[in-house]
Image (cartoon, rainbow, N blue to C red):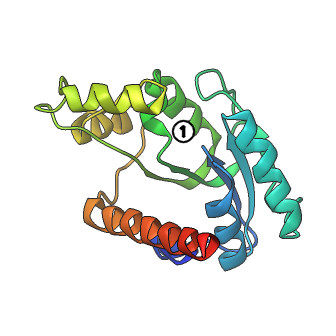
Amino acid sequence: GPAEYITEMTARLGLNAQMSMLDLGAGLGGPARAINSAYGIWVTAFEGVPEHVKTGMELSVMHGMAKKVPITLFDPETIELPAKKYDCIFSKEMMHHVQDKKRLLAQIMDALKPNGQFFFTNFVITDKGKNSPRVQAWNDADGQASALWTKDEYTTAFTNAKLDMRVSEDLTQRYCAIIADGFRGLKKNMDKLIA
């Protein structure tokens, strides 16, 4: 989604330049750079795909954010996060790929400063959809297995990790609209290139 979508979602966190943030599953780093631009907060960005790390770091350099938004390779299944280091940990559509979510949530809890916040968006599933052939088809097309959880499974895991769930919001309609806008923009750009 556009930078405005990210900054609108993170506005409720009260971020400022004196805080520290970790972005887990940063992709090419666009959301982390948008957050840095909006709030001045320095963001450590971790990404699990080597090609994304390389390209994302090149983009951070191009935007003059090499030190403010460095992108580093990580494995969410084995990461050891430093204790009490971050005011906020952010993750966008990465958690469904993590097989051992409980371990990662424990790491996140330990890495947050007192009164720290964990903000994430992710794909969830209903109990009815857990064995859906459409989910299997999505996993096959994605090239990596999703370990999708229900909202209740996240709520229970958050409670067990001593994380309070303050806000839970269904962003499906907005997310679908952003995807549709993205495809329209891609088609428009392709039409211009072809012309």
Place of residue 190 in the rendered image (x, y in percent of width and height, measured from the top left)? 56, 68
Most foreground residue, 31 or 133: 133
Let me know if residue 71 appears in the view.
yes
Question: Quadrant location of residue 140?
Answer: top left
Name, please, the residue furthest toward the left. 128
| Vertical position of residue 94 compared to residue 13: above or below | above
Place of residue 11 in the rendered image (x, y in percent of width and height, measured from the top left)? 51, 75
| Vertical position of residue 192 compared to residue 81: above or below | below
Query: Would residue 172 be found to the left or right of residue 76 on screen?
Result: left
* Pointer 1 local density, CA inside 10 Å: few below 14, some 14–19, many at least 20: many
* Image quarter in which the C terminus is found: bottom right
Q: Please count the marks in the image.
A: 1
Let me know if residue 146 appears in the view.
no
Most foreground residue, 34 or 59: 59
In the image, what residue occupies the spot 66% across and 78% down?
38
Place of residue 173 in the rendered image (x, y in percent of width and height, measured from the top left)? 25, 65
Most foreground residue, 36 or 167: 36
Name, please, the residue furthest toward the front. 195
Query: Would residue 132 be found to the left or right of residue 170 on screen?
Result: left
Query: Would residue 18 be found to the left or right of residue 152 on screen?
Result: right
| Vertical position of residue 30 compared to residue 16: above or below | above
| Vertical position of residue 169 compared to residue 72: above or below | below
In the image, what residue occupies the spot 74% across and 38% down?
51
Place of residue 181 in the rendered image (x, y in percent of width and height, measured from the top left)? 41, 71
- Mark 1 lies on a secondary structure that is helix
In the image, what residue occupies the spot 29% across and 57% down?
168
Kind of residue sitting beneath label 1: Met
Q: Which residue is mark 1?
A: 109
In the image, what residue occupies the spot 65% across and 70% down?
34
